Amino acid sequence: MHFPEENNFIYKQEQMTPCSAEHLLSTIFDNKYKGLIVISAQGTVTQVNNSLAQALGKTQENMIGHPLTEVCRHRGLRKIIQAIKSGKPEFSKIDNIGGKSVLIDYLPIYKENEVNGALAKVSFFNSERSNKNKELQLQDKNDNAHKQRTHFTVDHIVGSSAQLIDLKETVRKIAPRNSNVLITGESGTGKELFAQAIHSASLRRSGPFVKVNCAAIPDTLLESEFFGYEEGAFTGGRKGGQAGKFEIANAGTVLLDEIGDLPFSLQAKLLRFIQEKEIQKLGGGDSTISDVRVIASTNVDLDHLVKYKKFREDLYYRLNVVNLYIPPLRERREDILDLVDYFIKKFNKLFGLHVKGISSEVEATFLRYSWQGNVRELENVIERAFNIIEGNTINVSHLPHNIIGSGYKQYDSESDDTVNSFNLGNALSKGQCLSEIMEHTEKLVILQALLATKGNKAKASKTLGISRPGLYKKLMKYGLI
């Protein structure tokens, strides 16, 4: 048996002395941190090491000599049979064994140019020891600085609007898959937050999460950032070369932020990587495989760029397998107060303050303001208020001038012509149906509650027996804020 050189990863059996073969197999299989299993061409387990047997809840004696399909219910490991049928290896497939994320390589075994069996190698890369394994870590310690871990999950996405609830449910559905995702939405809507949530809920969560801002890196450096370079590839390069972001993110996720700014000249190479999962460093001849899930995000209209030949159509469809559109804050105003409460708690902790909330005038202002900067702008406004606040309530005086006065509405007897009168006969004569009459009546009752409380929405919601967010939904419905 020998291991072919270069990129030929297929094991081939040749004549070896019994002693050397026994020694080699012993060295390979006595591995505490990797699972190994070998099956014959007929699908019978011929070898399995103790690490994998224990992970499957079996013993070596219970598995060896039995058909794989009888002693192993794990569908991922059963795919080893495909390596016998196809005669081709597969690398770095993400799976789960015993509640732990793993990488599985499937390798056909050849004897006299015919497939004689197959081997599966399982890397337990979420265990402390296997994280140190060279196959799952980069040789260059400096590259660790490029690796990122996600800080946010689906539960960190704040809001109770119908749009956001649907988005969070979609994230939970698509996260376990490996399909590429395109996240679109205006600047500041939280696209990276959703990307991190997808990674955190996936089987790749133990792997790296690497973000690349396609707009922040000069065009001339993007290719080396993506794919890396070998030593001597260009003047000024680091000694020993450098790994690219796709290599660093092996077994994890890459977020290509601002994908619309990716140079057209590089789009073809990105497309090839997405299709083949192959990396070829600048200045290097050999290619390597990297199993990466690609999430792309943009605040521009890629359809428009495709139409005017500024973005490759084939790349667009490769990226746009699953599309998540994050609506702007002004289209989901129900989330504003939830976000305000979240940011107040956040900055109370950071500033060591005890701010309790915002005034009713500020509530009205926030709910009417357009929020062109979306969630990021709202967070900045709250942080600004924390820098100048005196007391425990954020008032209008603590807001930027461009926001002041954009939303407060004074409720008085002139605020609505129908506030003090309603005639059922007139409504019926106008052809209004029951639902229209009910809505008109509800609006009237809400206005009267606001008049009685002098516009205090907290008191009005208590008077009406509904929650404050529920009151705001009705105010928006009837155009009362």
Image: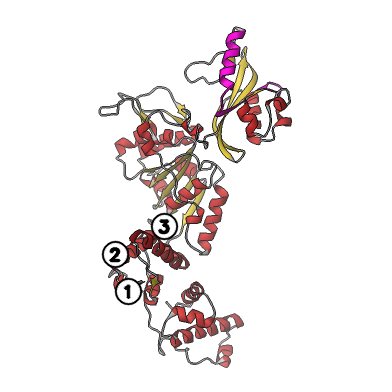
Q: Residue at x 49, y 79 (%)?
A: 461
Q: Residues under labels 3 and 1: Cα distance?
A: 24 Å
Q: Residue at x 57, y 50 (%)?
A: 173
What residue type is disc 2 on?
A: Asn
Q: How many C-alpha atoms fall within 10 Å of the one at disc 2: few (<14), some, or many (≥20)? A: few
Q: Residue at x 39, y 60 (%)?
A: 346
User: Quarter of the image holding residue 99?
Assistant: top right
Q: In the rendered structure, are the residues bearing label 1 and label 2 in contact, judged by CB atoms less than 8 Å apart?
A: no
Q: Which residue is mark 3?
A: 189
- Asked if residue 87 lies left or right of residue 4, the reply is right
Q: Position of residue 28 (x, y in %)?
A: 56, 20
Q: Is residue 322 above or below residue 28?
A: below
- Label 3: which secondary element: loop
What residue type is disc 1 on?
A: Val
State which quarter of the image contains the N terminus.
top right
Q: Which residue is mark 2?
A: 387
Q: Position of residue 480 (x, y in %)?
A: 44, 79
Q: Which residue is mark 1?
A: 396
